[in-house]
Amino acid sequence: MPERPAAACKPEEKPARKPGRAVPGEARRVRADAEKGGRGAGRVFEKGVRPHDGRKAHVTEGTPGLRLDVPPARLFMPDTFAAEALRRLPEVLDAVMPLRRAHRADLPDAIRELSAQLTTERYALARSYWSSPRLVSAYLRYFLPWNLLRLHCLFRDLDLPLPPEGTVPSMVDLGSGPLSVPLALWISRPEWREAPLRVVCADTAPRPMALGLQLLEQLAGLMGVPLTWQIRLERAPLTRVLNDIRLRPTLLTGGNVLNEWQAQSQDASIPFGERVGEVAMAVARQLPEEGTALFVEPGTRLGGTLTATLRQAALEEGLWAVAPCPHAQECPLLGRRDRGWCHVHRELAPDAAPAWLSSLTQAARLAKQSLSFSYIQLRRAGTEATQPERGPVGARLLSDAFLVPGLGQARYACSSRGLLLVPHAARLCPGSLVACRLGSSPRRDGKSGALIVEELADGR
Ligand SMILES: C[S@@+](CC[C@H](N)C(=O)[O-])C[C@H]1O[C@@H](n2cnc3c(N)ncnc32)[C@H](O)[C@@H]1O
Ligand SMILES: [Zn+2]
């Protein structure tokens, strides 16, 4: 059974604020945290990595009588198309960047070395891993496929409509690397895959983008699906791209780039928090009415701090922070250094990763049992539904399920009423949005101070 996570306390004592407005004190605190790099500062990239100990995933339980707006919880398993694309990825990797026998034998060591660089040795980033063919192979064969699984987990259920017919959809991907985010979108969302999408990929390193483009083209051929996208690669820092006034993308993305940008900004004269403010301002300028911005970072405290920093800055710019926190107030987990943070954590089904990736992961002695990431989804304000004063409260399920006497397997959730404790929630998907009824004078959980949800609502 998982250890019960500690959680934020007394969220209800905070004064109510107008939705859509950020909390100045909170913004300062989050930014200061981001400048320090979050606790532990290390660029921890891979939270799901643990020594392989054969630990079993949690058992789910049923809760009769509750109807929800989410599918029943299940261990994470990719969709058929994505699973097949991942299974066949080595074929395109071998075509795009063949490995000599000696390099193949060295791959697990190269993966471990890159993992160390990406997790703890932040200053080693000064020597970019993209300039070492050995580490490029490690990225493409290990980090790329795991990132694709994580991003697939996010994209699959994300509210991400295409723009109205007659409009040409466009995407800008910042810090694109080997096009991980476009690749993940392509394998995850058929309607986007088939659209005449214009994609601009931008990165300070051009080589991984060129490799990623070949991967996408070859994967499309292998899967027998025509590639309908027009893709342009741009060697440019993210700030320059964001200041390009002609972009106006339907989808603006950044995958695992804020943490590198933050590491590079350590010595900059402008504090990092202010620089994030400029990014938020640019996002607010760039996003069209129907547009979405999506930044994904590791599921670590640092990743959570970076996305929370951007959330605050975005709220100050009048953007709508759609997810993960389903409200415009302070996240009840924010700033609780000893506690959790708003992020997604999904246990993996035993065969969620293709067999070749599981073997490679084991060979590198980096066995995984879960996917975890932090993210922030932004849209233009004005289209969001307002939270009614009465009735069910929207809440994002956050934690693993843990046993609470009298409440079964419960999960914490983030809501406008602060931290909630949702009873009998093991079967619900962590990361999903649920509608909760709290009752007129809700009880508080003695350990965390969270309000205890009376029942889940289905809108009837
Ligand atoms: C960890 S990789 C992520 C690649 C890909 N988005 C993914 O999720 O797998 C970070 C990428 O950001 C790029 N990068 C770092 N700082 C950048 C900056 N200031 N502007 C644009 N790209 C940057 C790096 O070259 C690298 O390709
Ligand atoms: Zn939250």
Image: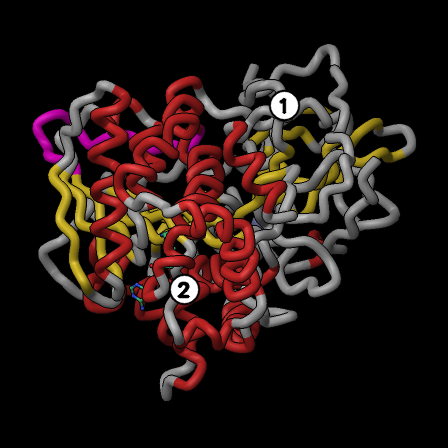
Q: Position of residue 71 (x, y in %)?
A: 56, 19
Give the CA distance from mark 2 to mark 1: 33 Å
Identity of the amino acid at label 2? Answer: Ala
Q: Position of residue 358 (x, y in %)?
A: 57, 35
Whether the residue carrying mark 1 lies under 8 Å from ligand 2 is answered with: no
Q: Is residue 167 magenta?
A: yes
Tell me the number on the disc at residue 38: none
Residue 392 or 228: which is nearer the viewer?
228
In the rendered image, the residue lying farthest to the bottom is 269
In the rendered image, the residue lying farthest to the front is 101
Q: Which label sits in the foreground, 2 or 1?
A: 1
Q: Tag 1: Cα neighbours inside 10 Å, few (<14), some, or many (≥20)? A: some
Point out the tag, 2 or 1, that comes first from the N-terminus. 1
Which residue occupies 50% across, 76% down? 35
Q: State which region is magenta.
A: 157-169
Tell me the number on the disc at residue 313: 2
Left or right placement of residue 45 versus residue 430 in this view: left
Q: Image quadrant for the C terminus?
A: top right
70 lies above or below 378: above
Q: Position of residue 285 (x, y in %)?
A: 21, 58
Q: Is residue 256 magenta?
A: no
According to the picture, the residue beneath numbered tag 1 turns out to be: 73
Q: Secondary structure at mark 1?
A: loop
Left or right placement of residue 105 versus residue 161 in this view: right
Identity of the amino acid at label 1? Answer: Ala
Quarter of the view holding residue 208: bottom left
